């Protein structure tokens, strides 16, 4: 097994343990034993449990970004692309949280750590949104004037919805009312 494959296997094992037991209840020994690797191997790749936890978060973020990138590459109108972006982002986040069981509680408990890990990806995501908005401005689809400001506001709005969307009740509600939610985000609340 190559270096990156070993590291990825350790991250996968840690993710499963964190999801089942919660981050606080898992030790480096637990990860080493579950991975059938020695502690020395584990410490070759990760300085401590927080480092491997950060790697788990980064892996989940990269999966989210892959899905967003697929939407960005689509040859569709900017308003449709923005609509797909919103729900791909929310669906992928919800899937990651449900896939990771106890990590869901850790995700919201350690939001600073998660946000710190997401910072670089947030800038990337904001750039993608800015391109969508600029394309929509250029095609006279969006009536906004500042693509960057629109991107900042949209990312903040979508990230603000993550916690609610990850709850099954709200996820069902959002999915039933996607058009109303998108209209509120696109057009505002006033007539």
Image: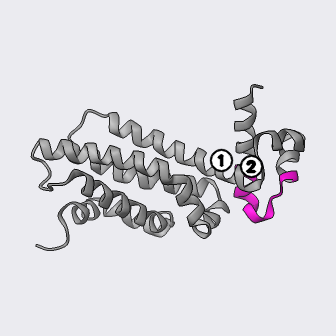
Residue in front for this viewpoint, 45 or 67? 45
Q: Is residue 156 left or right of residue 28?
A: left
Residue neighbourhood size for the residue with mark 2, other residues' Cα within 10 Å, grouped as few (<14), some (14–19), many (≥20):
many
Numbered badge on residue 74 = none
Q: Is residue 151 magenta?
A: no
State the SS at label 1: helix
What residue is shown at x 59% (from left), y 47% (from top)? 58
Estimate the x, y position of residue 91 in percent, counting from the top left.
Answer: 45, 53
Compared to residue 176, the image places residue 3 above or below, namely above
Most common secondary structure along the magenta stretch:
helix
What residue is shown at x 82% (from left), y 49% (from top)? 31
Q: Which residue is mark 1?
A: 55
Residue in front for this viewpoint, 152 or 182? 152
Compared to residue 30, the image places residue 1 above or below, namely above
Compared to residue 160, the image places residue 91 above or below, namely above
Numbered badge on residue 14 = 2
Q: Are marks 1 and 2 in contact (CB under 8 Å)?
A: yes
Q: Is residue 22 visible?
A: no
Estimate the x, y position of residue 39 in percent, counting from the top left.
Answer: 88, 44
**Number of callouts:** 2
Q: Which residues are magenta?
A: 15-29
Estimate the x, y position of residue 163 in percent, counting from the top left.
Answer: 48, 67
Q: Earlier in the sequence, mark 1 or mark 2?
A: 2
- Judged by depth in the image, the label closer to the viewer, 1 or 2, is 1
The N terminus lies in quadrant: top right
**Disc 1 to disc 2, C-alpha distance:** 9 Å
- Give the quadrant of residue 67: top left
Residue in front for this viewpoint, 119 or 85? 119
Residue neighbourhood size for the residue with mark 1, other residues' Cα within 10 Å, grouped as few (<14), some (14–19), many (≥20):
many
Compared to residue 186, the image places residue 128 above or below, namely above
């Amino acid at each position: 097994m190559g270096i990156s494959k070993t590291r990825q296997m350790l991250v996968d094992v840690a993710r499963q343990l964190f999801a089942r037991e919660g981050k606080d209840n898992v030790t480096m020994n637990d990860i080493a034993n579950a991975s059938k690797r020695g502690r020395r191997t584990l410490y070759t790749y990760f300085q401590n449990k927080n480092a491997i936890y950060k790697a788990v978060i980064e892996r989940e973020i990269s999966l989210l970004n892959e899905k967003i990138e697929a939407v960005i590459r689509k040859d569709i109108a900017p308003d449709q692309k923005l609509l797909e972006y919103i729900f791909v982002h929310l669906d992928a986040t919800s899937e990651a949280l449900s896939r990771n069981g106890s990590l869901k509680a850790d995700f919201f408990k350690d939001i600073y750590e998660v946000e710190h890990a997401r910072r670089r990806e947030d800038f990337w995501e904001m750039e993608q949104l800015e391109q969508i908005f600029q394309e929509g401005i250029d095609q006279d689809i969006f009536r906004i004037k500042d693509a960057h400001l629109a991107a900042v506001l949209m990312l903040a709005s979508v990230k603000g919805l993550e916690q609610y969307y990850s709850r099954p009740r709200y996820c069902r509600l959002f999915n039933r009312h996607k058009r109303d939610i998108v209209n509120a985000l696109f057009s505002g609340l006033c007539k």
